[in-house]
Each structure stands twice: as C-alpha cells, then as structure tokens.
Image: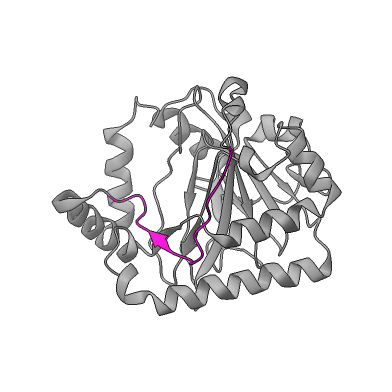
Amino acid sequence: MFFQKKLSIKGNRGKKFSINLLEKNGFFILENCFSIEDVKKLSDIRKLLIDESKKQKKIISQLTGYELGNLNIEKSFIHEQIWDLMMKSQIIKKTFQSFNVNKIHEIRSFGGNINFPNSIPQAFHRDSSLEKKYLLIFISLEKISSRNGSQEVISEYKLNGKNFIDMLITRFNYGSNLVDMNPGDILFRYSSTWHRGTRNNSEYPRPIPLFSIDLNKEKSKKIQKTIKFKKKISFKGNYAPQGIFGKIYVFLACKFNRPFHIIIYFSKLFKSQ
C-alpha cells in the first residue's frame, strides 16, 4: 500500500546493542537499560523541559519553526545529567565504548527536539549526506508513539540509490517505520537515514534529548578538552528558512502540508539532500 507505515517492533530493537542491525536498517533501538530509579529521573528531566517551554513561550514563539510546532533543544546541564545516568548502565557504557567514546568531552554535539501539540508533519529528509554521516543518539524520556510524535524512518537496506526519487520509490514499495519507544529506550540513528518528524496529537509537548558521535576516527581524535554546559534550559529555531522565504515556507507547510511536501520532493528528485 502506498505510504504504508509500520511499527518498528521486530528486527531493529533489543536489550543488547547490534551494530549489524544498525548498519542494515540505519537505526536501532536499545531497549531500556536504565534502572527504575533512573527512568524516574529521566521523567523529571522531561518535566523540566516542558515547564521551561511554557515559561519561555513568549520568547520561543518568535523562533523559526515554532509555528510548525518543532524546535531544537540547546546544550545544557540536562545533557550532563543524562550522560551520568547512561554511564551507570554497563550495556550503554559498552555501546558508547564501541564507538571510541569513553568520556563526555568525546561527544560530537548535544541537542534535542521538542515537538509541540498539533505540530506540522515534516517532509522526509536526511541530516547529512551518506559520505559525511555521523551517529545520532536519542534518549526517550517518556512513552513515544504516533500519538505524541514518533520519528518515521525508512530502512537503509531497502534503498537502491541515495536521491529523493530513490527514497520515494522505496517508501512506495515498502512503506516506512514509526519508531515507538518506551521510557528509557535509546534510538541510534545515522544522520544519513531518511526520516521525518510526525504530528504530536497529544496535549503535551514531547521533548527528546540528543547526543551525536563522529564516526570519522581522525575527527574523533580532535576532542574538546573542556565543555561548558548552560545552566539554563533554552531552545532554538529548527529547519525552516529565515526571512521572507521562511514565512512563505511556514505558510505553505501549515496550510497545504501534503501538496507542499510533494512540491519539495519533485523539486529535489535527483538530489540526495
């Protein structure tokens, strides 16, 4: 069926990390390796992020992408807290070590995403080219499903090519995967994997913190000696363009979402990004 969505339940998740399944699918879900106590601490971080988004509404409502219901989470003390919780789990710690990451200053970047109620679904895209891919690591603070905006991804092994037209053909033939997660699950996804954010149909914002790892061994050696984390939670604009083009983009995305996505796809049929 055209544009079929499937739940990513079998074959790409487990309680033990699988590099083979990550390579095959372009994503893998490491199921809850946190203690019950630490899952509660993750829930507290979720509450902090939601509360701050409400307190800062006047400020963040001016940011690019807010009208689309999707903003980025900036690096702050919560990333330190989550890192400390992850390092308490031997399974998570060993998974990071398998990518030559032993300390927090070896992390490529810190961030995240907050998906607001009634958000606008994104068009499928990649965060980088295949040649420059890096690894994204999302930590679920709550149960994530189609109700509150799960990621939708296309499995790598079904793709035959790297352009938009190849992605569309693959989705037409095989559908896509909705990445449902439980509190404490960790999503590993390559930046080059085709994906999109979906609508948040719940009444609460859905935040998800993010870490990234550089896969280039030479670059990974150039680690930061010190990292300064903000003492206050803050947000920044997301994927929409700036200026007048941003206003046009937001208007079309909000009023004519699916037709607008079709226009985007056809304008980039033979491009990889």
Q: Is residue 116 visible?
A: yes
> Is residue 180 visible in this depiction of the protein?
no
- Going by the picture, which residue comes out furthest to the front? 225
Magenta stretch: dominant SS? loop
Q: Please tell me in which quadrant of the rendered image residue 18 appears.
A: top right
Residue in front for this viewpoint, 83 or 150:
83
Assess whether residue 224 is covered by the magenta stretch. no
x then y, percent, for residue 202: 51, 75
Up-down: is 84 above or below 189? below
Q: Nearer the viewer, residue 129 or 8?
A: 129
Q: Residue at x 50, y 25 (%)?
A: 130
Quarter in which the C terminus is drawn: top left
| Residue 124: percent from left, percent from top | 43, 44
Q: Is 109 left, or right, of 119 in this rendering?
A: right
Query: Please, which residue is most extreme toward the left here?
Result: 244
What are the residue bounds of the magenta stretch?
225-240
Q: Report the label total.
A: 0
